[in-house]
Amino acid sequence: MMSLACVLDVMRAANRLSRRKLFSWELLTLNGEAATLSCGLPIHSDGALNANSLGDVLIIIGGFNQDKHVDNATLIKLRGYMRQFKVIGGIEAGSWIMARAGKLTDKKATTHWEDLEDFALRFPQVNVRPDRFVIDSNVFTTGGASPSFDFMLHLIRSRYGHHLGLEVASAFIYDGIHTGNDAQPIVSLGALERTEPRIAKAIRLMEQHIDEPLSVSAIAEQLRLSVRMLEYLFKQNLQTSPGKYYLRLRLQSARRLVLDTRLPMQAIAVRSGFSSLAAFSRQFKLYFQVSPSHCRKQ
């Protein structure tokens, strides 16, 4: 719902604030029926995407389980429909559908940060970037809801000027400080990045070393802090120790892989920085009160 809103409502606001119809759109689904979003809300469809669908831009918005929703037969039809548009865009899992359709071959592209590694492995012919959004010739891709907002603001600024872009961002009380080249963070630090940049840098180091965890002393050394000072900063600001925070970050990363991929548990353990499957399973069950395998079955 957020990804959809960050595309549609930005265009609506641009029309309202400019007092002109700068954008018009249709909501189309593959079968013409309402689409049920991941939050369970059904969204009305204006019709089915078909051979008569024409426009400047086709924006494909996708969430979980895109393989299940777009089988190979449907993908062949979709590939044909894509030729009817000047520009193709993929929002979140829309990037996967574009890549499967061959629209991202030899192109730079991105997708949601949770899926970047799997996306790169699945589509080696795509130049995968960790950016918030990527534009390459007549295709664009974004990493999710907030990056889609950033992209739409970029579109407004490039077509209609910075003044309107500022007005639209202000209407949503959005700072609009991000560019497409900004990396997608695993943890959104918010005000903490300004109020305590040392903790922010520590967390960024942890993000970069999920599969091969650094020791707390190594993190402190890179930040030119003592271990005691690093522990004090985490305790004061996050009410936990750096070691516990780091472990929680790795376990949350592992849980996403358990729920959203079909990777074997051994592979998830390695990606999460655990020396053995037994150690991974033990820590996972201790934190989430359920084993990884049972979590996936549920």
Image: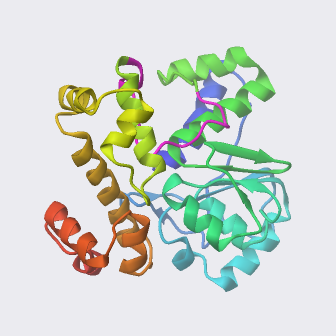
Q: Position of residue 205 (x, y in %)?
A: 44, 41
- Name the side, left or right, on which 153 lies relative to 9: right
Horizontal arrangement in the rendering, residue 267 relative to residue 244 (left or right): right
Image coords of residue 61 (percent x, y): 59, 57
Give residue 8's position: percent from left, percent from top: 58, 41
What residue is at 86 percent from the left and 48 percent from the top? 137
Is 82 inside the magenta-drawn segment? no
Please give the name of the residue rendered at 66% of the width and 22% of the height, measured from the top-left corner: 165
Is residue 282 shown above or below 196?
A: below
Main secondary-structure element of the magenta-colored stretch: loop
Instruction: Give the side of residue 27 with respect to residue 190, left or right.
Output: right
Q: Nearer the viewer, residue 206 or 7?
A: 206
Q: Would residue 204 be seen by someone viewing this image from the given angle?
A: yes
The spot of residue 131 in percent (x, y) is 63, 44
**Extreme residue in the top direction:** 163
Quadrant in the picture for the C terminus: bottom left
Q: Quadrant of residue 195?
A: top left
Considering depth in this image, is 8 or 184 the residue closer to the camera?
Answer: 184
Q: Is residue 110 above or below residue 157?
A: below
Residue range highlighted in magenta: 178-194
Task: Tell me the residue at 22%/33% (across/down).
Answer: 231
